[in-house]
Image: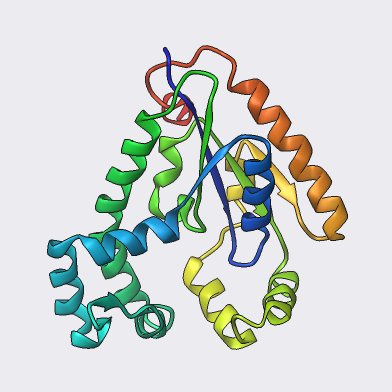
Amino acid sequence: MSRAFRLGITGKIGSGKSTLSEVARTHGIRVLEADAIAKEVMNSNSDLRLKIVSIFGEKAYSDGVLNRSYLSSKIFTDDSLRSELEEIVHPATVEVFEKEFRKGKSGEVIALESAILFQTGLDEIFDAVILVDSKDEGVISRSETSGKLTPNDVRNRLNSQSYHIEWKEDAEFVIDNNGSKEEFLKRCESLCELVKILAIENLPESPLRMIIE
């Protein structure tokens, strides 16, 4: 069938997903960002906005724009609120993902970067999933260096993502990011080239992971 190869990129917060995505783009791979798409959907979908306000109150939006810091302070310290938000946002974002995938052509690779592919069952919509593996101490160290989050914020998000070591066995590719940045970049380069080769093959109508599972 004439369609694009669907690639999932996942891993813990701060594991190196964004670095892999940057390398993928230099290799001609189009990378969608789940967080950015979810944010856009939560800002533009009026029905979704009403549901979010009903759960989190008027502070969920500031001057008509999603108040991400407020929302984050709620969902990363309360699993029930996080699950409730994911339940209403997930269908709308998946619809956008599928629409973008359908735009792809044969031989093209379209990737989606998300920290919660396995947690949400979204992994089934891909032909292959790359999991970026990084120990918690490395994640915390990189986050501290970036200055974007405090160590406590990172730990809260790591806990909320409920990462399971078993997912390393479920992913088609696991890329290690527990050494130097140079080593990680080399692995990213090699893996991107391999994925581009796989995309040349004739693909069935349904995603390969859905068929295999």
Q: Quadrant of the N terminus?
A: top left
Query: Which of the colour schemes (rainbow, by chain, secondary structure, one colour) is used?
Result: rainbow
Q: Is residue 168 left or right of residue 106?
A: right
Q: Is residue 27 left or right of residue 37?
A: right
Residue beneath the point at 57% across and 58% down: 164
In the rendered view, tell whether residue 42 sits above or below residue 199. below
Q: Nearer the viewer, residue 158 or 114?
A: 114
In the rendered view, tell whether residue 50 sits above or below residue 168. below
Q: Position of residue 89 (x, y in %)?
A: 27, 60
Q: Position of residue 104 (x, y in %)?
A: 43, 28
Q: Dividing the picture into quarters, in which one does residue 163 lie?
A: bottom right
Q: Nearer the viewer, residue 13 or 42?
A: 42
Residue beneath the point at 54% across and 20% down: 107
Q: Quadrant of the C terminus?
A: top left
Q: Dividing the picture into quarters, in which one does residue 12 lie?
A: bottom right
Residue beneath the point at 34% across and 72% down: 82
How many numbered badges does the structure rendering display? 0
Q: Position of residue 200 (x, y in %)?
A: 59, 16
